[in-house]
Amino acid sequence: MKLSKSLMTVAALGAFVAGAALMAPDAHAKEGYEMCGGIVKAGQNDCKGNSHSCAGQAKKDADAMEFVYVPNGTCDKIVGGHVIKM
């Protein structure tokens, strides 16, 4: 019984850590770049979005929450682009 409770605790902690990792900003972001949303073609996003956690899974063009990395200061120059802060 005690082992079962310990296993459940470890499993719950593991699920929490995995969830936190998915919510964290992308660790692959390069210094000097910003996330520019609203300009991505379907399937061409750089990383996670609202409904997924992988690059290349944007479902529609110009989704406001899908992004690509662009050099800092570039996004504001693109029609429809907005900087996404995490």
Image (spheres, rainbow, N blue to C red):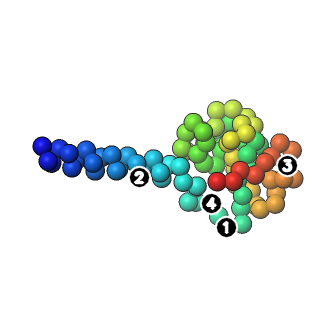
Looking at the picture, which amino acid does disc 4 mark?
A: Ala
Q: Which quarter shows the C terminus?
A: bottom right
Q: Which of label 1 and label 2 is nearer to you?
A: 2
Write down the residue under mark 1.
31
Element class at badge 1: loop
Looking at the picture, which amino acid does disc 1 mark?
A: Glu
Mark 4–mark 1 Cα distance, whole angstroms, equals: 7 Å
- Nearer to the camera, 83 or 74: 83
Left-right relation of 74 to 11: right
Q: Are marks 4 and 2 in contact (CB under 8 Å)?
A: no
Q: Residue furthest top?
A: 60
Looking at the picture, which amino acid does disc 3 mark?
A: Ile
Mark 4–mark 2 Cα distance, whole angstroms, equals: 21 Å
Mark identifier at residue 78: 3
Element class at badge 2: helix
Element class at badge 3: loop
Please tell me how crowded label 4 is: few (under 14), some (14-19), or many (20+) other residues with Cα within 10 Å.
few
Sequence-earlier tag: 3 or 4: 4
Q: Which residue is at a point 62% across and 60% down the rendered structure image? A: 29
Write down the residue under mark 2.
17
Q: Which of label 4 and label 2 is nearer to you?
A: 2
Q: Position of residue 9 (x, y in %)?
A: 27, 48
Sequence-earlier tag: 1 or 2: 2
Looking at the picture, which amino acid does disc 2 mark?
A: Val
Left-right relation of 16 to 10: right
Mark 1–mark 3 Cα distance, whole angstroms, equals: 20 Å
Sequence-earlier tag: 1 or 3: 1
Q: Position of residue 39 (x, y in %)?
A: 77, 43
Write down the residue under mark 4.
29
Mark identifier at residue 13: none
